[in-house]
């Protein structure tokens, strides 16, 4: 992909869609600023030595909130990583968003190439995905950055699953599971919707690729592997729903029944935004321009092959997702478990942008006249169609030096609770309105707040602070008599109190939900600590164990096939002789590597002259961008080897010979005798002097251990 012109020609368009990120501050979107403050809270916990904080101690006026226990931590992790590397809060988030835009379009480009779409069509598909109206809206108007992250990971999740189903191999299986795990950690609702997309796409690939039945069964294990890698987050987030007020997301404004859209709105053009309106119109559309541009792609249904399969699958996907956004799907929303938590049926606009982009890529393939001009016109239309969304207006919020006190002030002014809409993650025993806390003064002064409520101690008591940490505080307390004390923190599983090293009973205060315990008279060491639950720690160990198995992927471990072992060649250094017998190259025939010629085990096949084809590209360069062919009367030969079904052989020997010249492969372990001896047949040449590669070298098989293999043709 990185060697293709189409990919690099896509980059200027991506720079255009991310150009507003270069402006100072964040636009006045619905959710953008609150997600930036979540990054600030995550970085604060990283500095305190907690990588995955289930409890966000600085939210809700310092009383805390189980934010990251229930909401995907991946985007805050990425933002905190940028801050750890030295960027300020605002720059870190913007760099992450820009890189995610590139990541999403690169994934669509790769997916298009895997289906055999040429470089030009793949470039148009990548641009269409980046400029999909819903996705541009996410960047500058809605500001749901974790949802944007999930949509950028979706094409890669589909691509890795496709790669495994097509070529097999345990490494590919692990990669598919890893990308699905990242999707699960990105955004809960996007992950839920995308799981349905992943299952449908898997069925499409099974139909197109016809892999072995066993491999298709193992593909379902990809979902299990992804859930296992993300088990530390996914399983508690699902099983602990009853601990909080998630039911608030099913009522009032968040009731999905109030948010179905009509076809007129879903298929409309992107309107020009009126700056005179105090409440700008919500842009919820697939983009009429993209719908029109995708229609020629359906012409691929006329032709047999992979393009027809892709056009059929993408078309069904778009129609199905449109139906899920209209009232006709209401019974499905009412009876499908968890679907109601998606709140807004129009969230399907995000996943629908992917098949739309692939259809636009197919449209470039189907326009056979003036293809370069058609590609330029489609790309320009994609960009101009979303242009009204590229200029957000209003007062931007500069956040370079934002503090925890700013976080709490924003939470109050915006009418939020814990950087969420309606306090849906408040512990269930919090039933009264929260009216602030005395900890706010500590945050304004930049001090770590003291969470022991000294007002509850009897007269004559003394408190000595031993240590203060966001999730672990120790005190020396002298009491003249026993007392019930409370802490400035909400009660929630995972919190515990120890007195003189021994755990004691704790409970929530009625109404306020603050943590309480009983202290006996005398001098005691008191520790307030968020240690988590034993089952959470067990799930964390499971995810770490699976993650350690996936570590070799980052080190480039060779793929191990999931089928029967391949035939191995003896060790030695072999030579290839072309034409008059001159040596053209040598390679090591190691017994732990399978010998391949042009990507097919034990078979000579002429590759496209020039660079290697991209994964999944079964044509000589696809359409739109042609690779050069050898001159008439000359055959190109590539001898390579690969491991475990790798679709792209690593070139070891390459050369060229005239028609009728002999080819010999000589290895010392065969006694110096050629184990392959064949000749390049004289070929017919197409008009214009181009060699017919499909007719050349149809035979010429390699049988290790034999002195000669004849041409069966």
Image (spheres, rainbow, N blue to C red):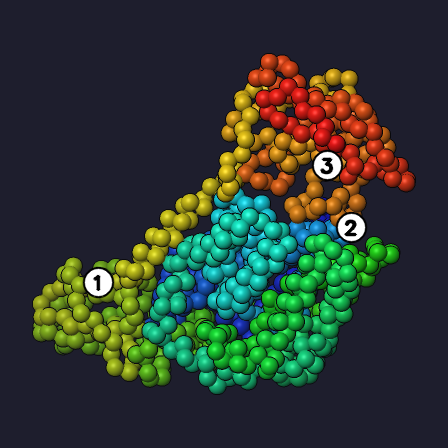
Residue 83: x %, y % from top left = 49, 56
Mark 2–mark 3 CB contact (< 8 Å): no
Name the residue located 11 percent from the left edge and 65 percent from the top edge.
523
Quarter of the figure with residue 668: top right
Image position, residue 98 (x, y; %): 61, 58
Please tell me whether mark 1 sits on a helix, a strand or a loop.
Answer: strand
Tag 2 secondary structure: loop
Report, in whole angstroms, how far the alpha carbon at label 2 lies from the one at label 1: 68 Å
State which mark lies toward you, 2 or 3: 3
- Regarding mark 3 in the picture, which secondary structure is present there? loop
Residue 405 at x, y = what percent? 42, 70
* Front-most of residues 214 and 443: 214
Q: Give the labeled residue for mark 1.
A: 527
Residue plotted at (65% across, 71% down)? 319
Which mark is in front, 1 or 3? 3
Residue 623: mark in rendering: 2
- Near mark 3 (Cα within 10 A), the count class, few <14, some 14-19 or many ≥20, is many
| Picture residue at 67% right of the left edge, 29% below the top | 701
Q: Is residue 554 above or below residue 95?
A: above
Query: Gap in Å between the C-alphas at discs 2 and 3?
Result: 17 Å
Mark 3, residue position: 607
């Amino acid at each position: 992909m990185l060697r293709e012109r189409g990919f690099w020609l896509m980059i200027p368009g991506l720079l255009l869609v991310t150009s507003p990120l270069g402006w100072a501050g964040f636009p006045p979107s619905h959710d953008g600023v609150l997600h930036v403050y979540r990054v600030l809270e995550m970085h604060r916990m990283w500095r305190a030595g907690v990588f995955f904080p289930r409890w966000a101690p600085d939210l809700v006026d310092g009383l805390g909130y189980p934010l990251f226990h229930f909401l995907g931590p991946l985007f805050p992790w990425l933002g905190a990583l940028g801050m750890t590397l030295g960027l300020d809060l605002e720059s870190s988030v913007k760099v992450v968003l820009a890189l995610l835009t590139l990541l999403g379009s690169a994934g669509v480009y790769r997916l298009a190439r895997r289906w055999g779409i040429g470089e030009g069509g793949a470039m148009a598909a990548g641009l269409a995905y980046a400029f999909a109206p819903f996705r541009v809206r996410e960047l500058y108007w809605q500001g749901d950055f974790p949802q944007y992250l999930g949509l950028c990971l979706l094409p890669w999740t589909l691509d890795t699953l496709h790669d495994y189903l097509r070529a097999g191999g345990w490494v590919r299986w692990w990669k598919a599971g890893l990308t699905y795990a990242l999707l699960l950690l990105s955004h809960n609702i996007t992950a839920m919707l995308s799981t349905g997309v992943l299952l449908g796409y898997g069925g499409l690939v099974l139909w197109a690729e016809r892999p072995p039945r066993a491999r298709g069964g193992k593909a379902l294990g990809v979902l299990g592997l992804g859930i296992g890698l993300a088990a530390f987050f996914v399983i508690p987030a699902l099983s602990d729903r009853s601990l909080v007020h998630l039911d608030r997301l099913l009522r009032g404004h968040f009731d999905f029944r109030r948010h179905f859209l009509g076809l007129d709105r879903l298929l409309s053009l992107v309107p020009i935004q009126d700056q005179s309106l105090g409440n700008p119109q919500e842009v919820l559309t697939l983009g009429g321009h993209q719908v029109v541009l995708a229609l020629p792609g359906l012409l691929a249904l006329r032709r047999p092959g992979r393009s027809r399969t892709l056009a059929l699958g993408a078309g069904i996907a778009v129609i199905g997702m449109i139906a899920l956004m209209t009232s006709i799907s209401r019974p499905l929303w009412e009876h499908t478990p968890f679907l109601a938590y998606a709140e807004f049926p129009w969230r399907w606009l995000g996943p629908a942008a992917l098949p739309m982009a692939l259809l636009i890529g197919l449209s470039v393939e189907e326009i056979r006249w003036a293809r370069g001009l058609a590609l330029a016109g489609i790309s320009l239309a994609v960009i101009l169609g979303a242009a009204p969304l590229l200029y957000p207006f209003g007062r931007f919020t500069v956040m370079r030096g934002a503090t925890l006190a700013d976080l709490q002030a924003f939470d109050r002014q915006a009418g939020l609770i814990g950087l969420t809409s309606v306090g849906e993650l408040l512990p269930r025993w919090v039933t009264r309105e929260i009216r602030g806390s005395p900890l706010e003064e500590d945050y304004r002064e930049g001090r770590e707040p003291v969470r022991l409520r000294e007002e509850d101690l009897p007269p004559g008591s003394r408190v000595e602070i031993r240590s203060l940490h966001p999730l672990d505080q120790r005190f020396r307390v002298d009491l003249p008599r026993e007392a019930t004390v409370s802490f400035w923190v909400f009660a929630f599983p995972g919190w515990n109190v120890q007195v003189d090293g021994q755990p004691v009973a704790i409970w929530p205060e009625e109404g306020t939900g603050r943590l309480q315990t009983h202290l006996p008279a005398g001098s005691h060491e008191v520790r307030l600590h968020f240690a988590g639950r034993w089952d959470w720690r067990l799930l964390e160990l499971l995810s770490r164990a699976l993650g350690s198995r996936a570590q070799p992927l980052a080190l480039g471990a060779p793929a191990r096939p999931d089928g029967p072992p391949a035939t191995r060649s003896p060790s030695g250094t072999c030579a290839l002789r072309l034409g008059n017998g001159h040596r053209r190259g040598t390679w090591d025939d190691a017994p732990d590597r399978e010998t391949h010629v042009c990507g097919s085990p034990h078979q000579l096949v002429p590759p496209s002259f020039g660079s290697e084809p991209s994964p999944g590209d079964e044509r000589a360069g696809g359409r739109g961008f042609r690779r050069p062919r050898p001159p008439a009367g000359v055959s190109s030969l590539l001898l390579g080897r690969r491991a475990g079904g790798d679709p792209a052989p690593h070139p070891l020997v390459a050369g060229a010979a005239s028609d009728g010249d002999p080819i010999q492969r000589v290895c010392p372990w065969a006694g110096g005798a050629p184990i392959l001896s064949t000749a390049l047949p004289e070929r017919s040449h197409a008009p214009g002097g181009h060699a017919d590669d499909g007719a050349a070298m149809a035979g010429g098989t390699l049988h290790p251990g034999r002195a000669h293999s004849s041409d069966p043709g």
